[in-house]
Amino acid sequence: MLGDFTWSVIDKEAESLAVRFNAITKNIANANTPGYARHNVSFEDQMKEVMERDNKLHMTVTSQGHIPSHPMRMSDVHAAETLVRDERYRLDQNNVDPEREMAALAETRMMYSAFMRIASNKLTSLKSVIAGR
């Protein structure tokens, strides 16, 4: 399993979705806090870039001093949490829309469940191979 690309994607996705869960729960908890700026977490673009790296021409990193132009491996992907300050939802300068946050929470929960189902199916197939079925 070590070095398996599918496992690295599942691991990074679960890690990043946990960061998103945390951000969404902070947003919901502070929905009535005046001046609170909601948190947004993004990582999908980085993951997509790593998955499609064979389809693009990138500069080659040949030395530790070189700065890569993109994430090189799935382990280089990091969930970026940002504050969204340019949207104002209410007069008290709070920009948390509880309905949008609950929808984001449901979407994140479904994504997490889907990736855990993929992990479970992969483990089941590995158990079958090990058992000789």
Image (tube, rainbow, N blue to C red):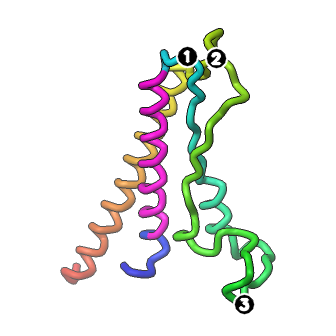
Q: At x 42% / y 48%, what residue is drawn?
A: 18
24 within the magenta span: yes
Quarter of the image with the C terminus in it? bottom left
Look at the picture and state if 17 lies above or below 8.
above
Residue type highlighted by circle 1: Pro
Marks 2 and 1 close (CB-CB < 8 Å): yes
The mark that comes first in sequence, 1 or 3, is 1
Left or right of residue 59: residue 45: left
Q: Report x, y in % for residue 109.
A: 41, 40
Quarter of the image with the N terminus in it? bottom left
Look at the picture and state if 117 lies above or below 58.
above
The mark that comes first in sequence, 3 or 2, is 3
Q: Which residues are magenta?
A: 8-30
Q: CA distance from mark 3 to mark 2?
A: 48 Å
Look at the picture and state if 25 lies above or below 75.
above
Tell me the residue that label 2 is attached to. Answer: 93
The outermost residue toward the left is 131
37 within the magenta span: no
Tell me the residue that label 3 is attached to. Answer: 62
Residue type highlighted by circle 3: Thr
Q: CA distance from mark 2 to mark 1?
A: 6 Å
Tell me the residue that label 1 is attached to. Answer: 34
